Amino acid sequence: MNRSFPALARLHARRYPLMAPQDFGKLAYQSEFGPGHMVSDPALALERLLTECRGLTPDCLHRPPEPIGGGLCRFHLEPAHLSQEGLLPLVSLLFTATACRHTGTRAGLEERLESLLALDIPGYPAWLRDYRAEDCPALHHSEAFRSAYHPHYRVLERDYVNFLFVLLAIWPLARGGRPAVVAIDGRCGSGKTSLAALIAALFPCNVFHMDDFFLPPALRTPERLSQPGGNVDRERMLAEVLLPLSRGEDVTFRPFDCHAGRLRPPVSVPFRPLTVVEGSYALHPDLAPQYDLKLFLTCSREEQRRRLLEREGPEGLIPFLEKWIPLEERYFDALRPEAESDLTVDTTGFFQDPESL
């Protein structure tokens, strides 16, 4: 836990001034353990979610997702969610996945609880002594909190909520049973690989990376490299991956080894109905007709640089600034993949938990 958890709790206190010591304790418990104690049966979790939403009144206040630390947030329920096809079943799936993926420790909970003493919350020290004497069980909101704010939410991983409407677009493709290919293009550092991994963790699918289709040296003619996006072997991606997938066939391809500058031995990938192709140049016009859903991720230049510096280090950042980013931007300007995408997502505020700021 970062020392900023008390600052996060202070933000909640400003939003909910009637928070009691018990509500601060619940915030600490949820931040550490997630919703695992709430999920015993996925089917029952969905039934309870639907029942709760049906009971909401039309005047229920809209609340944006609220970060609670630990990479988690509270996703508030609204009556309108009932009319959004597939949304609540997806939220229930994400709720169950969060419960499975997020685990905490008693030591972590104790650290969070102890840190809240610095806020001078009236009655909190005595409440904390009693809570520890009860062996720190899971908590409900206080009666005062429930009466004043009528909380109806599910605790979800923050990245799930960030990409909620992307996942909602993929949801019918993942359940449809027919071959479907999702493409994720966008700026380097915008989260393409992270999103592909998130999708693969939720839905059975294969993931192919455009980095494995970098153009081999023998094909790097001046004419080819003068083309926007000419530095990827889109012909091989089409022949070895996309066309076999369109026929429901297994895929055998040779990934390009960027360090050795040559193709690696063939890799065989059994067919799955859902496939994700991620990486810059994925939405090149030669490839775009093969996709069922086209996504484009972007972020601010400042955030792009920050992420690449964190990921690559100072020396590794240089080739991105001098070579890879200019090549990408030339491709974006000339072929406009963002304009041709089905969904564009600006990830500038993603991937940072408030506790890490």
Image (spheres, rainbow, N blue to C red):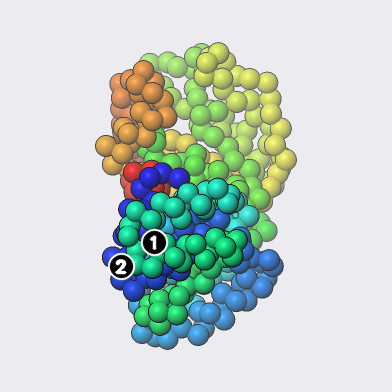
Tag 1: residue type? Glu
Q: Position of residue 198 (x, y in %)?
A: 54, 47
Above-or-below relation of 135 to 244: below
Residue 127: which disc?
none
Question: Label 1 near label 2: C-beta < 8 Å?
Answer: yes
Is residue 312 at least partly visible in the picture? yes
Which of 182 and 145 lies nearest the eye of the viewer?
A: 145
Is residue 95 at least partly visible in the picture? no
Q: Where is residue 99 in the image (x, y as percent from the top left)?
A: 60, 58
Quadrant in which the N terminus is drawn: top left
Q: In the image, what residue occupies the spot 58% across and 51% down?
A: 106
Task: State the CA–CA distance, disc 2 to disc 1.
Answer: 10 Å
Q: What element carries label 2?
A: helix
Please name the residue that numbered disc 1 is placed on.
66
User: Which numbered mark, 2 or 1, is in the foreground of this view?
Assistant: 2
Q: Where is residue 29 in the image (x, y as percent from the top left)?
A: 51, 59
Above-or-below relation of 12 to 204: below
- Give the quadrant of residue 165: bottom left
- Give the quadrant of residue 50: bottom right
Which of 60 and 106 lies nearest the eye of the viewer?
A: 106
Which of 335 and 325 lies nearest the eye of the viewer?
A: 325
Please name the residue that numbered disc 2 is placed on.
15
Tag 2: residue type? Arg
Quadrant in which the C terminus is drawn: top left
